[in-house]
Image (cartoon, rainbow, N blue to C red):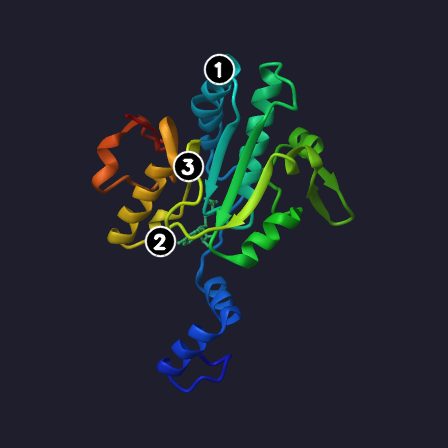
Amino acid sequence: MGRSSMPDVGSYVDLLIHDDAETTELISALSINVTEFFRDDGAFEALSEKIIRPLLRSKRETGGILRIWSAGCATGQETYTIAICLNEEMRRANMPEDMVASITGTDISASALAFARKGDYSELQVKNVPAYLLKRYFIKNESSYEINDLLRKRVRFMKEDLMETPKSKFFDAIICRNVLIYFSRPSHDEVIENLHESLRSGGFLMLGRTEALMGRVRTSFEMIDPENRIFVKVS
Ligand SMILES: C[S@@+](CC[C@H](N)C(=O)[O-])C[C@H]1O[C@@H](n2cnc3c(N)ncnc32)[C@H](O)[C@@H]1O
């Protein structure tokens, strides 16, 4: 309100109704975009072993595109970390790099998504990325590390509000970490229902380590890794 010189809440709400740019600014100011590459020790090993590996195995048998959704991806570090894990698992299994697999990163914050699309990170931001992976998936610039084409071609970013009807369905896995903690209980339940709808039967859901699965659809999930909050959607 101060920045836009609005005298009271009513005038500020009026401004929001008529000015999309102000709404975007407000969302950026309110959203907590804290994130990092390989956030939480061991979480991405679990992602590789318990989600990516079985999915690659079944896609190798049945064909089809492997589709992963990184929901609430902030500035992209989580999405690119998933892409690194996917690529490393494909190398491990001697699968061709051109195998069709896509990762969609979504967030409500337009400024966070712009950063994610740029894919250019400071030395401090890549501190958790092991040296051999930095070499394999980043281009070293003078004072930053840029995501290389191998990862870029697998990843796309889109603006999407998790409270709204999901735009895509039949994902093989949804990684939604450290997002639900910011929601009230009714909103949490709504988001979980949307994620449930977007996931194919037998697909995987991974939440953040401090997050719980609540609401009507929680019985449609079987927990397979309590520490890393990994669930499978049962039919
Ligand atoms: C703390 S970050 C988590 C980033 C990443 N998932 C991680 O664990 O490192 C939470 C993200 O959720 C996003 N977010 C909050 N509400 C949202 C909503 N309704 N729809 C989509 N994204 C939302 C925020 O903009 C923010 O970028």
**Mark 2: which amino acid?**
Tyr
The picture places residue 75, in percent across and down from the top left corner, at 55, 50
What whole-number distance in Å separates the C-alpha atoms at marks 3 and 1? 19 Å
Q: Residues within 10 Å of mark 3 (few under 14, many from 20)?
A: some
Task: Please tell me how many numbered marks the rendered image carries.
Answer: 3
Work out whether 192 lies above or below 28. Answer: above
Question: Which is in the foreground here, disc 2 or disc 3?
Answer: 3
The picture places residue 55, in percent across and down from the top left corner, at 47, 21
What residue sits 62% from the left and 19% below the top?
A: 91
To which residue does mark 3 refer?
A: 169
Q: Of the two numbered discs 3 and 1 on the same chain, state the one appearing first in sequence.
A: 1
Q: Is mark 2 within 8 Å of ligand 1?
A: yes
To which residue does mark 1 refer?
A: 62
What whole-number distance in Å separates the C-alpha atoms at marks 2 and 1? 38 Å
Q: Are marks 3 and 1 in contact (CB under 8 Å)?
A: no
What residue sits 35% from the left and 53% below the top?
A: 182
Q: Of the two numbered discs 2 and 1 on the same chain, state the one appearing first in sequence.
A: 1
The picture places residue 192, in percent across and down from the top left corner, at 31, 43
To which residue does mark 2 refer?
A: 182
**Mark 1: which amino acid?**
Thr
Per the rendering, the mark at residue 177 is none
Secondary structure found at label 1: helix
